[in-house]
């Protein structure tokens, strides 16, 4: 039989029973829509986790003193870190940026008013380690640190509240009554846990001399330090190198518990990535189950159709139709029904997903691969669940079929 004739017969059989065809298609439509939406949601979650793992915060290693741990010799004082530690860490292969930090709560004031905030004594790399954006002006330089220049960078919130959101460059602020000239404005991402709303960044040297104070045991001390690895860098290797540097600098033996802590958030985010993969798999399985239920519906309706059209099948066989022709017609009918349902299901899944994105703030990724997988699943359902009714129709005895009432 001509393939076009087979397709025409299958299409006419579908439209002759519109209500039954629509009800049969609903299972496939819902299944394809569910698979499409679930896969898009899973890909969206995967993309978000990958972006998170590549973010600056995920590649940051923070080092804090851990004075709760006892040193081998109690005669040794509690030592802060040194600027030379920061310089050595910065030179580790794979490190993109490193900076020391001093911190103190302060009062920030000008002619308009005063605020309670925090002063950070930092180096030039601090802008990178905080993943901050320079909105106006210039970053702190090594020259500022060498000369203990009384300059500062302020957060966007301070600019808004003390300068009425006007350009503050060249203006003076007082931090604990110490005058600083504003040279830049920065903005820290809202997801940066270490960033606060009202921050002032100053060269670490003048912060130490005028605001925070020195340390009688360590010259050029820093309270903590942080390093950011390059994209693709081995963070575990960087951590090992940092341990070697700090243990040597602090006079610790290899078997001595360190009096500092290395903190990285990457392990937690990698664990979240694994959980996301598991959730994405479960979502895909749920969609596949919906599609499977729809396929069972197609098979049931096709079996009913074979029963109802037994005399028609017998007549066609008596007129010379072969088993392959009969089987091809019913298989084509099931496949055509699933193709139409698959196309409609993709549309329903897309618009329902877009609605979920707008109302529930979900991240979804609509890719050609997701659409092909969803649509391909409907074709497989058509072939698999259409085969049994088609084979049953092809195996009917023509004489018995003609006698069927």
Image: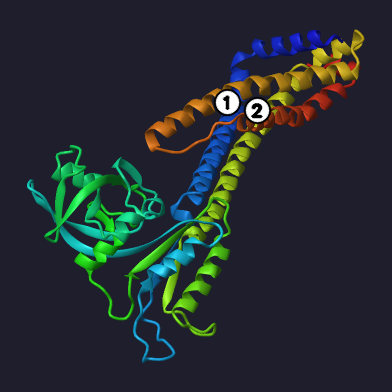
- Marks 2 and 1, how far apart at CA: 7 Å
The residue wearing badge 1 is 346
Residue nearest the viewer, comparing 256 with 375: 256
Q: Position of 15 compared to 356: left or right?
A: right
Instruction: Tell me if 223 is positioned left or right of 71 in this view.
Output: left
| Quarter of the image where one finds residue 221 | bottom left
278 shown above or below 288: below
Which quadrant is home to the C terminus? top right
Quarter where residue 319 is shown: top right
| Location of residue 80 in the rendering, given as x and y in whole percent from the top left corner | 35, 75
Q: Secondary structure at mark 1?
A: helix
Q: According to the image, label 2 marks what residue?
A: 375
Residue 113 seen anywhere in this rendered image of the structure: yes
Q: Earlier in the sequence, mark 2 or mark 1?
A: 1
Whether the residues at callouts 2 and 1 have beta carbons within 8 Å, the answer is yes
Local crowd at mark 1 within 10 Å, few (<14), some, or many (≥20)?
Answer: many
> Of residues 49 and 87, which is closer to you in this image?
87
Quarter of the image containing the N terminus? top right
Colour scheme in use? rainbow
364 vs 181: above or below: above
The residue positioned 21% from the left and 56% from the top of the image is 150
């Amino acid at each position: 039989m001509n393939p076009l004739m087979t397709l025409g017969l299958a299409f006419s059989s579908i439209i002759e029973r519109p209500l039954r065809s629509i009800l049969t298609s609903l299972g496939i439509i819902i299944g394809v829509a569910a698979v499409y939406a679930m896969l898009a949601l899973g890909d969206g979650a995967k993309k978000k986790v990958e972006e998170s793992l590549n973010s600056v915060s995920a590649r940051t290693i923070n080092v804090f003193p851990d004075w709760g741990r006892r040193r081998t010799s109690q005669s040794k004082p509690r030592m802060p870190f040194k600027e030379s530690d920061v310089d050595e860490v910065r030179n580790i292969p794979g490190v993109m940026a490193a900076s020391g930090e001093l911190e103190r709560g302060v009062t920030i004031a000008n002619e308009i008013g005063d605020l309670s905030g925090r002063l950070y004594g930092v180096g030039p790399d601090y802008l990178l380690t905080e993943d901050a954006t320079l909105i106006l002006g210039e970053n702190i330089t090594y020259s500022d640190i060498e000369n203990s220049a009384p300059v500062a960078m302020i957060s966007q919130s301070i600019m808004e509240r003390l300068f009425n959101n006007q350009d503050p460059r060249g203006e003076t602020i007082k931090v604990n009554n110490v005058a600083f000239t504003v040279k830049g404005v920065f903005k820290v991402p809202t997801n940066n846990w270490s960033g606060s709303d009202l921050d002032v960044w100053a060269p670490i040297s003048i912060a130490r001399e005028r605001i925070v104070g020195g340390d009688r045991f360590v010259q050029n001390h820093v309270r903590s330090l942080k390093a950011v690895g390059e994209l693709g860098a081995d963070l575990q290797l960087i951590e090992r190198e940092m341990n070697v540097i700090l243990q040597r600098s602090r006079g610790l033996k290899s078997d001595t518990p360190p009096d500092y802590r290395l903190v990285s958030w990457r392990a937690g985010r990698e664990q979240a990535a694994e959980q996301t993969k598991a959730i994405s798999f479960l979502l895909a399985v749920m969609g596949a189950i919906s599609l499977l239920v729809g396929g069972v519906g197609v098979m049931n309706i096709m079996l009913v159709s074979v029963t109802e059209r037994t005399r028609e099948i017998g007549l066609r066989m008596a007129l010379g139709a072969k088993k392959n022709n009969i089987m091809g017609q019913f298989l084509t009918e099931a496949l055509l029904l699933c193709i139409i349902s698959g196309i409609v299901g993709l549309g329903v899944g897309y618009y329902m997903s877009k609605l979920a994105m707008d109302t529930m703030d979900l991240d979804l990724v609509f890719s050609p691969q997701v659409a092909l997988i969803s649509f391909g699943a409907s074709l497989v359902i058509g072939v698999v669940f259409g085969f049994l009714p088609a084979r049953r129709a092809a195996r009917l005895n023509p004489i018995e079929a003609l006698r069927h009432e």
